Image (tube, grey):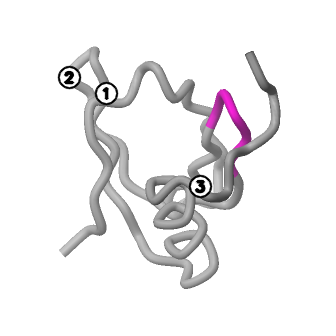
Amino acid sequence: MTTELETGLPSIRQIQTLIRDETEVELKLITNDLLTGKMRWQDPHCICLFDHFDQPTIVWRQAIVYMKPKA
């Protein structure tokens, strides 16, 4: 198993675009929680989401049901 980010994958590229553009997103988790904020970074295992109070939350990728830009 590789621990490097596979930048050729469309999902990784889309997340990088959301990070670069500072797009606000919604993350739905398997716990049925809904998180909103801006992603600051990603690694092979986690995504860091900053909320409206600029507080970071690290979310394990395996806990995400879906992610979408906030409308």
What stretch of residues is rendered in magenta? 42-46
Viewer-side residue, 56 vs 67: 67
Number of residues whose C-alpha sits closer than 10 Å to that of mark 3, classed few (under 14), some (14–19) or many (20 or more): some
Relative height, residue 4 to residue 26 (above, below): above
Q: Using the image, tell me which numbered label, if any, was put on residue 50.
A: 3
At 81% from the left and 37% from the top, the residue drawn is 4
Q: How far apart are marks 2 and 3 (CA)?
A: 19 Å
What residue is shown with label 1?
29
How far from the left and from the top, in percent, is residue 36? 37, 53
- Relative to residue 61, is residue 65 drawn left or right? left
Residue carrying label 2: 32
Tell me the kind of residue under disc 3: Phe
Secondary structure of residue under mark 2: loop
Which residue appears at 50% of the width and 72% of the height? Answer: 18
As measured in the structure, the alpha-carbon distance from the residue carrying label 1 to the one carrying label 3 is 16 Å
Q: Which amino acid does label 2 sit on?
A: Asn
